Amino acid sequence: MYLSLLLTAAAVASAANAPVKCPIVFDGRVKATTQLTDFDSYSTSLFNAEYVKGQNLKWSQIVKFPTVNTSRFDNDTHKPFEVTISDTSIFQTQKGFRRAGLQFQGDTNNGSPASTGIKTIHFSIKQDPQRALNLSHEYLNVWHEAADYSANQFNFEAGTILGQTSLPRNTWKVLNRQNKQVWSTPIDNTEWQNFAITLDFGKNTLQVYYSKGDEPLKSVTSAVSNNNAGEGQYQIGMLKKPTGTSDVVNSGFQESRINEGLIYGGLFIEDSAGGCVSL
Ligand SMILES: *[C@@H]1O[C@H](CO)[C@@H](O)[C@H](O)[C@H]1NC(C)=O
Ligand SMILES: *[C@@H]1O[C@H](CO)[C@@H](O)[C@H](O)[C@H]1NC(C)=O
Ligand SMILES: *[C@@H]1O[C@H](CO)[C@@H](O)[C@H](O)[C@H]1NC(C)=O
């Protein structure tokens, strides 16, 4: 009896989530009281209500609130959310992609506070067994795209990377601006996986932090050299590339009746001036 009480107390304690230590620049942690329709309006969403998604879809049709425990940097005032894609997830004329990507409201393409100094984007992700990814495809899930859309300063990806099929498909991969893999870890099908990526816009470096479940983050790369120039915006969600084409934006093969998603929690950008990173 005494032992089981102790174990219960320990389980509750380990579920008490970690505080954010550094000043938050953009908070993408969704409040527990948030309704799906709150994502549809600039006045109620943390994100851009009109981007980046199929024009005929509302964010309230794209986002789900799955029944899963909160992740490391969430607490009882937050809830996880899932970004899904379907056959209608076609942005503008980009018929090759199936995509739905959230942008922080205020993360302007030019002059964003999150594209200067030293900033760390945090995100935790979890698989939805009902909406599994098809790892024969390449997925972009989190990235920072330069303001002139000519490159992404980094990509956080899964699946089969086009042109780099020697990389295993069942891993999360951090790629640098040249699309070279900096680090990877196996996709876990049950646990939360927690990531943080620090971009030093002055020194042009990138550093990756990682943990699983409730574990504290650990640095898993050094601050590796990366060209972070060109400002731009972060994007978080799902972008599924087609197969069998050299023009991935506009053409190629996508399965029909797509019903895929990825669960997110603990999403925020913090100011890492002076080396501050929440672990
Ligand atoms: C939440 O975590 C507790 C303790 O680990 C576990 O018993 C429970 O099944 C989890 N709930 C969900 C919905 O994952
Ligand atoms: C939960 O997180 C919020 C930040 O969104 C913070 O203000 C609040 O103090 C936290 N609550 C607990 C119980 O830690
Ligand atoms: C996964 O994608 C490949 C390539 O598009 C396709 O051939 C295959 O049928 C898909 N598998 C599932 C389970 O959808």
Image (spheres, rainbow, N blue to C red):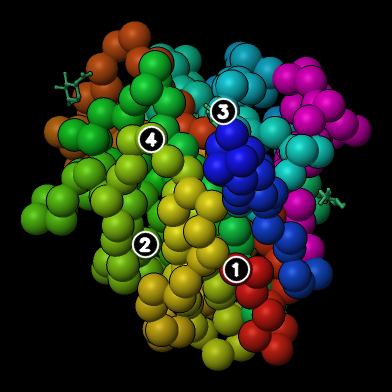
The residue singled out by tag 1 in the image is 279
- Identify the residue position indicated by label 3 in the image: 68
Q: Secondary structure at mark 1?
A: loop
3D distance between C-alphas at marks 1 and 4: 21 Å
For mark 4, what is the residue? 190
- The residue at 70%/33% (across/down) is 79
Q: Amino acid at mark 2?
A: Val
Expressed as whole percent of the image width and height from the top left, the position of residue 100 reads 53, 32
* 56 over 208 or under it: above or below: above
Task: Label 2, secondary structure: give it.
Answer: strand
**Which residue does the image show at 60% across and 81% down from the upper left?**
201
Residue kind at label 3, given as amino acid type = Val
Residue 21 appears in the rendering: yes
**As drawn, 45 above or below 154:** above
Helix, strand or loop at label 4? It is: loop
Residue labelled 3 has its Cβ within 8 Å of some atom of ligand 1: yes
Q: Quadrant of the N terminus?
A: top right
- The kind of residue tagged 4 is Thr
Task: Specify which label sits upstream in the sequence, 3 or 1.
Answer: 3
Magenta range = 24-47
Closer mark to the observer between disc 2 and disc 3: 3
Q: What residue did someone put label 2 on?
A: 174
The yes-or-no answer for disc 4 within 8 Å of ligand 1 is no
Q: Earlier in the sequence, mark 4 or mark 2?
A: 2
